[in-house]
Amino acid sequence: MKTTVENLTYSYNGHPVVNGVSLSPREGEVTAVLGPNGAGKTTLLRCITGALRPVRGAARLDGQPMDAMPPREKARRVALVPQASNLEFRFTVLETVLMGRYPWLGRFAAESARDHEIARQVIDEVGLAAFCDRSVTALSGGELQRVLVARALCQDTPVLLLDEPVSHLDIRHQVDILGAVRRRAEERGVTVLCVLHDLNLAARFAHRLAVMKDGRVVAEGAPGQVLDPALIGEVYGLPVTRIDAGGRPILIPE
């Protein structure tokens, strides 16, 4: 399923926050969107999902504008992990993850044994197998973040959008979650677009990077090409030193 973002522009009170962005994330790859706070990364994802309507341009799946899709059809094609979510109802972890199967259920149909199997598989994949029966209101912020990722993986869509999915996680779980996302891309041909702040995690787990500044994409390509100290220093306003280890760039703030 081809995903394209074409000349997308969105403004708040007449001020363009996303300005003429075009991207073509690839099937079977993770594309990480990087940039400083306020660069327009979250707004870009919200425009792609149709939560915000751009003033110009469009996000398309196989040529069809995403904001014109019926909700159920869109939910079968695109899963989203939002930047923050407050789950106040006392659903269990299993019940919450099973919500990812709803787009695939018939009207008034209950989850099948296969749906439960898929849910338990992804719960195990994010390291929460021991938490299946625990209420989501009793979880830590990092545990809840992993539940949201599991719910999106359970949705089993060809496109996966993630907005800072590891921001509340310790380093081990950051690696586990991003590893699971990369495997989903490579093994199932999923198109992944993921907003990240950690440049070194992006270099480790993303196939391609897109760097945003002031609402525009200022660089796009493989991590080894994009993570240039001069470019990153200019975008973030902070000098960095680059070293290469294991064939991957690592940036160290000076």
Image (spheres, rainbow, N blue to C red):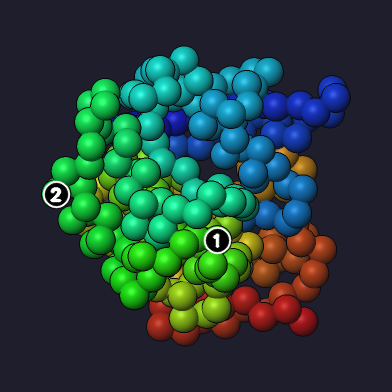
Q: Earlier in the sequence, mark 1 or mark 2?
A: 2
Q: Residues within 10 Å of mark 2 (few under 14, many from 20)?
A: few
Q: Is residue 43 above or below residue 92?
A: above
- Would you name the residue on which mark 1 appears? 137
Q: Is residue 28 above or below residue 136?
A: above
Residue at horizontal 73%, vertical 78%? 253
Position in image of residue 170 (x %, y %): 55, 78
Amino acid, disc 1 = Thr
Question: Which one is in front, 210 or 197?
Answer: 197
Q: CA distance from mark 1 to mark 2?
A: 26 Å
Q: Determine whether, in the image, residue 166 is placed left or right of residue 13.
A: left
Count the marks. Answer: 2
- Would you name the residue on which mark 2 appears? 113
Residue at horizontal 41%, vertical 78%? 247
Question: Which one is in front, 23 or 226?
Answer: 23
Position in image of residue 11 (x %, y %): 76, 26
Position in image of residue 89 (x %, y %): 53, 49
Q: Is residue 97 above or below residue 124?
A: above
Position in image of residue 198 (x %, y %): 60, 68
Occupied quadrant, residue 229? bottom right
Q: Could you tell me which quadrant the C terminus lies in?
A: bottom right
